[in-house]
Each structure stands twice: as structure tokens, then as C-alpha cells.
Image: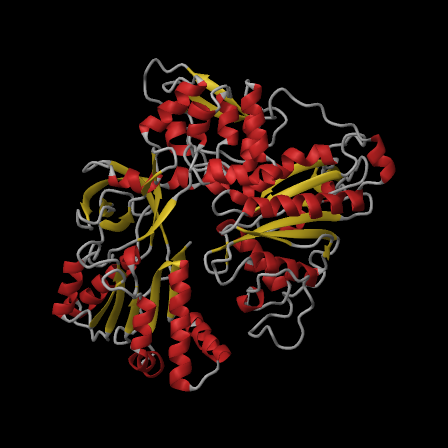
Amino acid sequence: FPLALVAGTGAATLALATGLAIAIFKRGSSGSNQANVTVEAKEEVEVLDPEVYPGGHLTVYYGSQTGTAEQFANEIEREGESYGFKIQVVDLEDAGDNCVGQILQDSKRDSLGKSRAIFLMATYGEGEPTDNAASFINLLRVKAGLPSLLLDQYTSTTIEDSEEKKGDEFVGDMNDEDVDPTWMEGLEFAVFGLGNKQYEHYNAMGKFVNDALSKVGAKRIATMGMGDDDADLEADFESWKDSALWPSLKKRYISSEAAGKQKKPATPKLPDCPLVLEYLETNGKAVKPDVIPLDEVHNSTKHYFTAVDCPVTLTRELRTPEDGGSTVHIEVDISKADKSKISYQTADNLGVLPVNDDSVVEAVANALGYDLNAVFRIQSAPGHDRQGALFPTPCTVRDCLARYCDLTSPPRRSELKLLASYAKDPLDQKALLRMASKEGKAEYKDKITGAQIGLVDIVSRLCKSIEAPLEHFITLAPRLQTRFYTISSSSSVHPNSIHATVSVLGNKRKDGSMFKGICSNHLAGIAKNGMVRVFCRDSTFRLPSDPSRPIIMVGPGTGIAPMRALLQERSHQKLKRKLPVGESILYFGCKNRKFDFLYKEELEHFQEEGTLTKLILAFSREQSKKVYVQHLIAQHANDTWKLLDSEKASVYVCGGVKMGHDVTEALKKVIMKNSNKSADEAKHYLDQMHSEGRFVQELWA
């Protein structure tokens, strides 16, 4: 999840765009040439009160896949005035192709002509940029003269200030005319990365930006920070923000004299809210949402506007009753949907928009006094720039809470701090502020995250004195995020139906109540022909263009989903298209063949027809010593090496991050054992396979 931020400073900074005089000649009535001179209006710049904002302007650019980076940007915005900076938050994608014009805009420069940016960069998946940072990352890569990201340089888990790379570390074709070492000259920057140490390329995007910006003329002004979502991402951000970001900015841009004259902001009765709601009289009639162009929609919530309602035609349980858990097979009918809005290729990703349970929605509405049937339209509050439509309106309060607000995930500590502003009971306020503080991290972990407490629990059971107007609640509640499932069907075999394999999440909380995964339970609970809102996106699972090439699939648990899709496609190639199809080897694992052997009958059928050459099974709980798929890969080392090296097999891995790491290590050992390669050489061998599209992993933490 990437993010960025730009600061302009100086007392009352007033930067005016240069006026451009244009002489336009036209034929007058007398036939003579007359010059009509038009002078372009100068850009209006907000003049800041130096006693309120001695640090000047500070623009926060964020890029985010799941909304975390945007939340961090908003936190900086809320704190800005107290530190002496006027904050503006901008989506990094909104910089568009004119990154320089946006980041180095005249109106944000200080009296010395400098601009300042802080990039909070998230890393997505296996070392990739988030969707709304991809264009910026690619442009920065080109301008810095880096033909590829070469993620191996950014895999360490420690911070080292970027050093100039020497030699031939970056190889490939690059047009020298595109390289520009002065592209961001005049920019002063700092970087915070959002990542997860479970993934190999930890914080790769943050490290890349931290390094690449220095190659295009920008100057680093603070040590890079890195956050680990596998531990405590929010604490890492808070520590960097308080100990590195604000001290560096204040020291560099606010003189001691200016700091002494700074007016402290008055404490408002309620936090500032960027939204106002217009309630509509509908007389009970349904109201359609406004038609809004996508370029006027908030980038992180476009799926709310573009997803398609489709019927669920089949839901069936894949585990036996003795197992106790639940994994369901879902089939979604897309036959009547607009193909321009939803279509898929074999083993793509299905995005599902979850819906909060009615009981959750009603608990929040009852606690906060909302009329669930009221209809409203969202507008920007006076003094706030429109950041794009958050979700379709007009809509009912019920739809707003059910579809667009995350009511069950544990709120971050910064959100507890915000909630405290709405608590009328001093005891509630004190408890929320205590858990929101650095000193209260242990209590927060025990009572909020460890207890799986969401906003619904806080407002309806734990802190009942909270009173928040709906527009404020919409602002402080995180948006309800899309859940992605790797599609378990072939588009050749099932062109009008998308299949998904869903593990239904549920566990007993500390207080004895049940915590249920919002999306998996939503899907499992949809009645036949009930609607689900979905869209598709590309995955990295693609069969070899030459079907005679062998494939090795590793998919324990629900990681079987894309493997089922690939096997359906191979069967279609073999039996329907009469193509020469190579070997297909599947490593599948589960606890016990009697309990959670997913798609057992189908896999056996693929074997019988000759599509599935080998089915290698790891039942971890059927013997005293647990056996997993990586152990079986080691047992078949010689055959695996032959397939990889002599027959150029493709390898597909799907499942948890730890499993993926263990499989990678097992494959390295296979390579080392059979080729006398070193560990580094074996890693390079797999990296080369990856670059060729022959080693594909989709993993989740």
C-alpha cells in the first residue's frame, strides 16, 4: 500500500503561476489586423497565516490497495495544524501523467522554490506496486534509468539509506533520452513503506522509491521508515511519524522564532468532517444512485460503482460433517451480465463485495439513532476539496452501513482516538484514549484485536455513550474492502459461470460470542439465485502457450482452486480440442482424507481420463509426524528436476505465504541436489523461471 506526501513551507507562501500573454490576431471590420491580447489568469494560491501554519503547505499523496495508506494520510492531515503545516491529501493516481506538474506545482513551492514530498509506499503481493501507484512507479523507473525493478535489491528487512548503484546491476534496453537525472530537481522527500515480512519482497516499493527518487534529482530529508503488517504496522507508522517525520519537518522548515509565535489550534467539539449529507424525501419510493463518471469517483472505491450483481446458482459443502469446519463451492451465473463489465479467463481472480449481516447493521443503527430507511446524498463540506465520490448515492442508511462501512474488523488505535471525541461518558472516553495511546498498546491488543472487537461492538455494547452524526461515522469507519478469490473454473468449459472455493471463517471469541468472516459467511448464506456483487481481475495463473509442456501444481487446502481451473482447461485442450497435452502433476494437502479432501471425486476423474498424470497427496494429520506438500516435493526431487530443466515445466503455487516459502525452499534444494548449483544459483534459477512466467505463486498472509 503506497502513499505519498508533499510539503511546501515558509511563513505565508505565495507562489503565483507565470501569466502567459497570448496575442490572437483576427480580421476586423475595416479589414485591418487587430490584436486581441488575452492574459491567462494567474493561479490563485491560498495565503496562509504564518502564526497558524509557519511550516506552510504540505500535500499528502497516497496510493493504497486496501485503504491503509489512505488512513495514514488522513491521520497526518488531522495532525498537520498542530505541527504548523497546512495539509492537502491527494491520491497518487490523481497525479496522472503530469507527475512533475503535480508534485512540483508552483503553488506549493516555498520561498526558495522547493517542494517537499513524503511518500508512504505500500508493497502489494509479491513485490508489486499497488494499482494506483503503478503508473507513477513505472514513470519513476524510466526517469531513473532502471530498466526493471529487480526486486532482489529490495528484499532485506533493515533500513539502509539508498546508495548510488554502481556497475551493471540494472540491465536491459533503455532509451537514454527517457532518463532524466533532474526530473524531480527541487523536491525534498522522505519515504515510509507499508509491507509484510511474511512476503519475500518486504517493503520493496518503499525501498525502490527511496532509492529511485535520489537518482532523479530529489533530496532525501528524513530516514525511511518501514511498517510490518505481520507485527504492528500502525505502531511502526506512529513511531516513524513521531520520531522521524514531524521532528525533521519542524527542524528543517520552522524557525524557532516562528515556532514561538505559532497559535495552537482550538480543540473542536467534534473532529472536522469533510462530508455533509443531503437527506431526500422519497415518499417510500426507490431512488436510483446518481450517474457519476468514473473520473469523478474516489480511486480506492471505484469497485463500488463498477461491480455487477449476479445470481449464485449453486452452493455446496466440500468438507464432511465430521470435520467441523466449512469450505463451500460457489457458482456465480454471469450469462446475463454485460460482458464489457464482467468476463474472465481461466483461474483469474473474482472480486466479491461483501455485505454486513442485518443484525450488525441494525445494532449500529440502534446504538447511534440512525433511521435505516432514510435516503441521503453525499456532498463535500464547505472548505473541503472533493476527493471523488466515496460510494453510490442517493442510498439508504441501511445500504450505506451494510455495503460500504467496515463494522466488524478491529479498528486501528488512531480510529479509537477519533471515536473518543464522540463519547459523552468520561469513562468511555478515557478507556478509548488509553487504548489509543502508545502506553495502551498491550491493552488494545488484548481487548480489541485479540478479542476481535469491531466498531459494532464498541458503539452498541462497550461504549454506549458514543454519539456520532452519520456523516462523521462514514468518515471514521473504514470502507468495506473487496475480498478476492482465485477462480476455480475454466472459462473454456464454463464461459457463463464463475466458480469459487471459499473457506467459511468463524470462531468463538473470548467473551463466548461468535466472530464470523464477513465475506465468506455472506457468500455461504446466499440462497439459490440470490445476488452477489462481483467483478474480475487478471491473475498470474496462465497455462503454457505450448500445451505439450508439463505443469507442476502445488495447491493445498483452498489453494486447490486455480489448480481445478487449470485441470479443467487441460482436459478441454486434450479431449475437446484434441491438442497434445503434457504431463500435469498436482501436489494437494489437507488434514485428513476423510474430512477435507476437497474435490476428491473430480480429481480422481481427471486421473481416470488421463488429464491428471500424478496426484501426490499430503494428509498432515493421518500419522504422528505431520507431512506437508513441501516434504513430498523433496521425495520426488529427481523427477521434479527432470521436468523443470529438461522439459521446461511450469510451476504453479497457491496457498498461504509460509507454505509458499517452504515450497520455494524445497524447489531450491531440488535444483541444488541435481545440478550442483549453489544456493544463490538455485535462487537465480527460480527467478529466471519467474521472469519467463514458468514459476507463478499467488499467496496470502
* 51 and 656: which is toward the camera: 656
Residue 507, picture quadrant: top left
Residue 386 seen in the figure: no
Compared with 127, 286 (above or below) is: above
Q: Is residue 578 left or right of residue 260?
A: left
Q: Position of residue 106 (x, y in %)?
A: 73, 44
Above or below, 311 relative to 133:
above
Residue 226, x across and y down, in percent: 60, 53
Question: Residue 649: where, in percent of width, then height?
Answer: 32, 75
Question: Could you tell me which quadrant the C terminus lies in?
Answer: bottom left
Q: How many marks?
A: 0
The outermost residue toward the bottom is 676
Left-right relation of 657 to 229: left
Of residue 669 and residue 496, the one placed in the foreground of this image is: 669
Q: Nearer the viewer, residue 245 or 584?
A: 245
The colour scheme used to paint the residues is secondary structure
User: Is residue 104 rendered to the left or right of residue 70?
Assistant: right
Q: Residue at x 27, y 59 (%)?
A: 560
Of all residues, the one furthest to the front in this rendering is 624
Question: Would residue 189 be seen by someone viewing this image from the given angle?
Answer: yes
**Image point (63%, 26%), residue name:** 383
Identify whether 173 is placed above or below 412: below
Image height check: is 514 above or below 253? above
Q: Position of residue 475 (x, y in %)?
A: 52, 30
